Image (cartoon, rainbow, N blue to C red):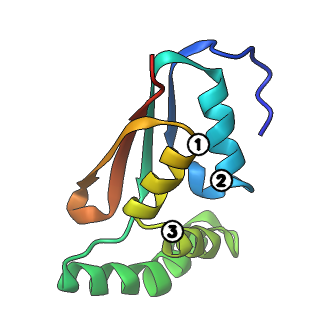
Amino acid sequence: MQLPFADATFDGVTVSFGVRNFHDMDAGLREIFRVLRPGGRLVILEFSAPTAPVLSSAYRFYLKRVLPRFGDSVSGKSGPYGYLARTISEFDDPATLAGRIREAGFGGVGWTPMTGGIVCLHTAMKAA
């Protein structure tokens, strides 16, 4: 939430499967905006929810029933995969995340669903 870098330091910032864990999403996005140079790009790869009914149902079942049990079994730890499933299912939909990115000051905001909508690639720019 307070990166140790001067304003306008970076040409690009990427985050993969991490923004859903920011304790304050809006403050985190504003901090990313601060450290980007004018014309800099933000690229976020984050989990989403498929919109096709059959895939959506199967994915919800996987997140709630399969992932926590299988992941905990393989890792030998109880809880981390339940947390992962919960953060994925509670995370903003792509349009809501795009709105939050815009509110942080970014322009050219868009997203591309991938893997049937299970993940989305979000992109934005800091105006030059």
Of labels 1 and 2, the one closer to you:
1
> Sequence-wise, which precedes: disc 1 or disc 3?
3
- Packing grade of label 2 (10 A; few <14, some 14-19, many >=20) is some
The residue wearing badge 2 is 25
Residue 74 versus residue 113 in the image, above or below: below
- Packing grade of label 1 (10 A; few <14, some 14-19, many >=20) is many
Give percent across and percent down for residue 79. Answer: 69, 74
Say whether residue 54 is left or right of residue 48: left
Of labels 3 and 2, the one closer to you:
2
Look at 54% across and 81% down and name the residue there: 69
Residue 88's disc number: 3
> What is the quadrant of the N terminus in the image?
top right
| Nearest to the observer: residue 3 or residue 57 | 3
What is the distance, in whole Å, between disc 1 and disc 3 at their CAs?
22 Å
Of labels 1 and 3, the one closer to you:
1
Residue 86 versus residue 65 in the image, above or below: above
Q: Secondary structure at mark 1?
A: loop
> What is the quadrant of the C terminus in the image?
top left
Give percent across and percent down for residue 105. Answer: 55, 37
Q: Amino acid at mark 2?
A: Met
Residue 104's disc number: 1
Residue 6 versus residue 71 in the image, above or below: above
Q: Secondary structure at mark 2?
A: helix
Look at 43% across and 52% down and name the residue there: 98
Look at 58% across and 50% down and name the residue there: 19
Q: Amino acid at mark 1?
A: Ala
